[in-house]
Image (cartoon, grey):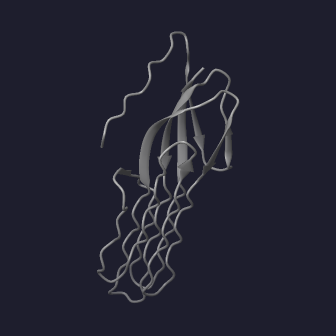
Amino acid sequence: MASTVFPAVAAGKTSKFERLTSGTDWTVPTGVTYVNATLIGGGGGGGGCNTGSEHGFSGTGGQIVMTTVTTTPGASISYAIGAGGTGAATGINRGGAGGTTTFTGATSAVGGNGGRTNGNSVGTVGLAGEISPNYGTGAFGNQGGGAGGAGSIILEYWV
């Protein structure tokens, strides 16, 4: 993973963290001119199966992307949280893909792929980046797969 150089913090400021799990807009606090944003895509759902000798694979976790975003105090920044992929129903079904998490001004974090069944390989995230553990579990023996976890955004800033 490439390293990122974050701007220096002014003396006397306090670090704050905020986790966004729902909603569509975030208002930049007074005095904040940049945020370190960690975006996590939604996890892929697990694959299903329909007999005792079959198995479904887990979905892949959502991509994790870290970046610095220049902000204007008082401005509203739009974002979207990637939903977790649906778990596959009983049968030879693939789990649903996780949704993409976005934060205006930052790179998006792609959701994980759904798990497959019967020895087919699990899909992978198409872009470089760390992968989160928010994937859905695969099934074994006539079961459906588990749903993937939703994405989120973690913001760090100083006031």
- Residue 129: percent from left, percent from top: 35, 50
Q: Position of residue 118 (x, y in %)?
A: 33, 83
Q: Position of residue 111 (x, y in %)?
A: 47, 60
**Residue found at x 33% / y 53%:** 128
18 and 90: which is toward the camera: 18
Number of numbered discs: 0
Given residues 51 and 91, the one toward you in this image is: 91
Q: Residue most toward the top? A: 11
Quarter of the figure with the N terminus: top left
79 shown above or below 58: above
Left or right: where does residue 35 sit relative to residue 64? right
**Residue for point 42% across, 27% down:** 6
In the image, is residue 6 above or below residue 49? above
Residue reaching furthest to the bottom: 51
Q: Is residue 27 left or right of residue 12?
A: right
Residue 28 position (above or below residue 62)? above
Q: Quadrant of the C terminus?
A: top right
- Residue 140 spot, x, y in % from top left: 39, 79
Question: Which residue: 67% across, 49% down?
Answer: 24
State left or right for residue 112 relative to residue 31. left
140 or 103, nearer to the observer: 103
- Residue 73 sits in quarter: top right
